Structure formats: structure tokens, C-alpha cells
Amino acid sequence: MMRDQTIRYLIVPGWQGSADNHWQSHWHRSLPNSDRVEQSDWQNPQREAWVSQLQRAIESDSRQTVLIAHSLGCITVAHWAAQAPDELLGRISAALLVAPADVERPNCPLPLQNFAPISQQTLPFPSRLIGSDTDSAASATRARFLAQQWGSEATILNGAGHINVESGHNHWESGFSYLYELQCRVEQQARRQA
């Protein structure tokens, strides 16, 4: 069961990384046993390079891992999960997917377009997607569609923008409740299967 073992939190930032005042950086400092995926080029993301770097970060630690992804990081997780070996997929307890970037949208920034098409495979681990009805990177309709494709539980926040520094989400303390709920659900499933 999850409480009996050390859970590793792996932060998966999106395009341009997560600055020091971004909630992902705050969570990285706050959560015990947390690491973050570091990309070699945050400005010009390349899908294969980002997916490979995520895989290396997961391979580097055998502990059960909860992924905490934002924006393009969510799309990277979906691409990784669609082609990852079972042994590594088995290390992922759950994923919190926040404000996924719709790289298929008409006004998608050019550097992100190589991440399209978005993987529509069901994620082989429990996940929760948090979107917003005022996110320019993904409409509420698209966020719900991605959640449905990925098999994620969906929550659409009102007026939360892209859930980043610009929309006032520096610490995003309320976001911890979604992480906690997700972990509780995983623990309950594990107990039922035990």
C-alpha cells in the first residue's frame, strides 16, 4: 500500500519550464521525495527528446512514482505512456495532469506543433486532469475530450486560466487536494486488489 512505501513525486514541466515562482516549483520544494524532469531545451521542445528525457527520469529511480505534469508536460506524459515498456509503466502509481496544452488547436505556437497529434491511448495508470474554462491553451471542451481519451477523471475550474503564474497560481495550495484525492483513490484500489 502506498503509505507503507516511499512515494516519489516527479514534476513534469511544460514549455519554457516552470519558473521559481510557478506552483510546480513550489510543490517541488514542498513535497518530500520530489524530483523534476529537466529538458535540455525548454524553448524549442522536440517531442522525441522530451519523451526520452521523461523516460530517463522514470528509469533512474525504482520507487513508485506519481507524475505531476503541467501543460506540454501532460502531452509528453501521454506520448511516453503510449510507447513505454511495461516495467516502467508499472512504476507509475498515478498522474495529475494540469492544464494540458492542446497542440492540435489552430493557434498553437509553432514550437509545440511537433507534439501533434496528441496520443489518444488510455493511460495505463490512474489519472486526474485539471482544466479551466478560460485556458487559452485548451478549451474546457478539449480538456474534457482529452480526459475521456486518456481515461482520466476530469475537473474543470472556473476562470483559472492556464493554471500558471500569469493566472495567479504561484503556490496553488488548493491543488494539493486533487493530488491527495488521487492518491487516496489509488490506495483504495490497491487495498481492494490485495
Image: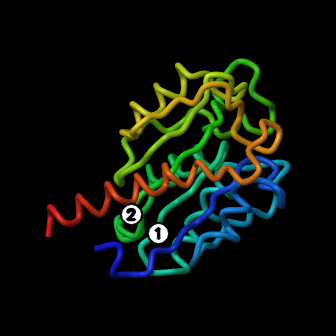
Pinpoint residue 110: horizontal percent, then vertical percent: 81, 32
Pinpoint residue 162: horizontal percent, then vertical percent: 71, 35
Question: With respect to residue 34, does 82 lie above or below?
Answer: above
The answer for how far apart the CA atoms under marks 2 and 1 are is 6 Å
Label 1, on which residue?
A: 65
- Image quadrant containing the N terminus: bottom left
Amino acid tagged 2 = Ser
Pinpoint residue 148: horizontal percent, then vertical percent: 39, 31
4 with respect to 136 (left or right): left
Which numbered circle lies on residue 93?
A: 2
30 with respect to 185 (left or right): right
Mark 2 Cα shell of 10 Å, populated few (<14), some (14-19), many (≥20): many
Question: With respect to residue 129, does 27 lie above or below?
Answer: below
In contact (CB < 8 Å): disc 2 and disc 1:
yes
Residue at image point 51% right, 75% down: 59
Question: With respect to residue 10, does 60 lie above or below?
Answer: below
Pinpoint residue 186: horizontal percent, then vertical percent: 32, 59
- Image quadrant containing the C terminus: bottom left
81 with respect to 26 (left or right): left
Nearest to N terminus: mark 2 or mark 1: 1
Please name whichever residue, 130 or 112, is drawn nearer the observer in this view of the structure: 130
- Quadrant in which residue 117 is drawn: top right
Please name whichever residue, 84 or 184, is drawn nearer the observer in this view of the structure: 184
Amino acid tagged 1 = Thr
